[in-house]
Amino acid sequence: MELFYSNPNRSFYVREITRKIDEQINSVRRELANLLNAGIIISETTNNKLYYEVNQEFEFFQPLSEIFGKGAGNPAKKAKTDAHKAEDDELKALGNVEIALLTGQFTRDESSGIDLLIVGNVNENQVHKYVAELEKKEGKEVRYAILSPSDFDYRVKIKDRFITTVLASKKQILADKNEVLN
């Protein structure tokens, strides 16, 4: 449940889930069936793969999100897990990251044209290393964009097509320092 609620706009296929939580495929399939029957997750087939994601329409989505998710409810009161702390540390190592979000292949919404957007004053070499690690971990190429805060603000102000499309797409927010995306 933590995997789904920590990644509310992201879909996973069975083998990906087994790798991420280090469990046997049969037990994962059994638990996915239970979660599907309860309505906690939903499934969809794309490119001959069955994907699962959290059902944001589930009547208890918000309370479960506060228990298992990160950043749902009041993030100041939410204790972070070791995985979330590691993710935060990885982003901090890039520099001053104001906004970081996953979209595209991570959310199965290709309308944005990218998979990762980072806004901030960051070390580009560190970002390249971060992306290389992400590509290795996910087993696929990651398309990404880096914007300075002033460039991002300007593009939002003029309703730049790229930024408008990215912000309108399905996304998973990794960081939003100034709560611009809420």
Image: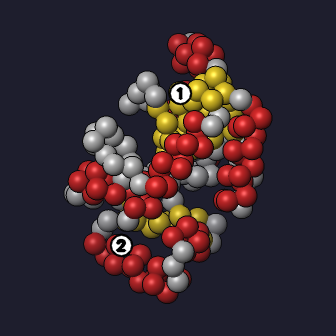
Q: Which residue is found at the position 53% from the left and 83% from the top?
A: 25
Q: Is residue 100 left or right of residue 121?
A: left
Identified by mark 2, the residue type is Leu
Question: Which mark is drawn over residue 98?
Answer: 1
Q: Which residue is found at the position 55% from the left and 16% from the top?
A: 153
Classify the position of the C terminus by image quarter: top left
Q: Position of residue 109 (x, y in %)?
A: 57, 48
As displayed, is residue 25 above or below residue 182? below
* Residue behind mark 2: 36
**Does dot 2 land on a helix, a strand or a loop?**
helix
Q: Earlier in the sequence, mark 2 or mark 1?
A: 2
Identified by mark 1, the residue type is Glu
Q: Position of residue 106 (x, y in %)?
A: 58, 52
As displayed, is residue 14 above or below residue 70? below
Q: Position of residue 7 (x, y in %)?
A: 46, 53
Q: Is residue 140 left or right of residue 112?
A: right
Asked whether residue 119 is in view, the answer is: no
Q: Which residue is found at the position 64% from the left and 44% from the top?
A: 115
Q: Nearer the viewer, residue 89 or 147?
A: 89
**Does dot 1 land on a helix, a strand or a loop?**
strand
Outermost residue on the bottom side: it is 26
Q: Position of residue 169 (x, y in %)?
A: 52, 39
Residue 49 figure quarter: bottom right
Q: Which residue is found at the position 39% from the left and 49% from the top?
A: 80
